[in-house]
Image: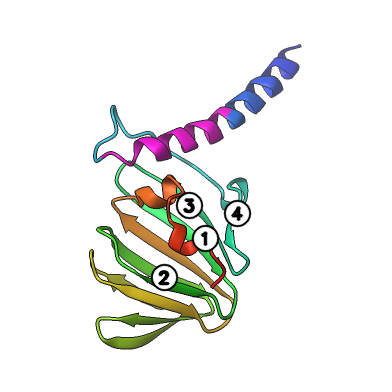
Amino acid sequence: MAKTKSKALSKRRAGAKLTKSHSRAKRAVTKHAAGTAALQYIPWHTIPLEELNPLLQRQFVVGQEIMLARVLLKKGCIVPEHSHHNEQLTYILDGALKFWIDGKEIVVHAGEVLCIPAHMPHKAEAMEDTVDLDVFNPPRADWINKTDLYLREKK
């Protein structure tokens, strides 16, 4: 009987963890979430892939004042020019992205990082199928609230 209760409790905790993560993401839109930051352990495979358009998918995890996104771009995917008040680090895990930024064209390859200051307009194109990790500070409210319409059309 104890084992059955223990398994049921573990399943409830796992479901609660996912619900807490989504709730925490919404609270992170404000500058300082109420209370103390909670430790989060989140395997990527537990986060559903969000399909923004046929060439672009993403997953993200949100802390109190930081966001980590795993972005999957098919060759030819274009992220239209945009800017945001968030500082951004882009680390390419696999593939390559060409950026148009600060009057330059920069190709960032696997193993390389691009640091984009807040408010700097930028555009990107996947030169091949690409997986990148983006870090934002503060978290992207438009991504959390799904108001990032510039990404939600085929590009």
Q: CA distance from mark 2 to mark 4?
A: 19 Å
Q: Are marks 4 and 3 in contact (CB under 8 Å)?
A: no
Amino acid at the residue labelled 3: Phe
Mark 2–mark 1 Cα distance, whole angstroms, equals 22 Å
- Picture quadrant where residue 149 is located: bottom left
Q: Earlier in the sequence, mark 4 or mark 1?
A: 4
- Whole-number angstrom distance, CA of label 3 to CA of label 1: 16 Å
* Residue tagged 4: 49
Q: Earlier in the sequence, mark 3 or mark 2?
A: 3
Secondary structure under tag 3 reads: strand
* Residue pictured at 57% horizontal, 69% vertical: 154
Q: Residue at x 64, y 20 (%)?
A: 9
Say which quadrant the N terminus sits in: top right
Q: Which residue is mark 3?
A: 60
Render colour scheme: rainbow
**Pointers 2 and 4 in contact (C-beta within 8 Å):** no
Mark 1 crowd level (few <14, some 14–19, many ≥20, 10 Å Cα): some
Q: Nearer the viewer, residue 13 or 33?
A: 33
Q: Nearer the viewer, mark 2 or mark 1?
A: 1
Establish if 102 lies above or below 61. below
Residue 16 seen in render: yes
Q: Residues within 10 Å of mark 3 (few under 14, many from 20)?
A: many
45 vs 10, nearest the viewer: 45
Q: CA distance from mark 4 to mark 1?
A: 14 Å
What residue is shown with label 1? 152
Report the span colored magenta.
16-30
Residue 155: x and y, percent? Answer: 53, 73
Above or below for 8 versus 112: above
Secondary element at tag 2 = strand
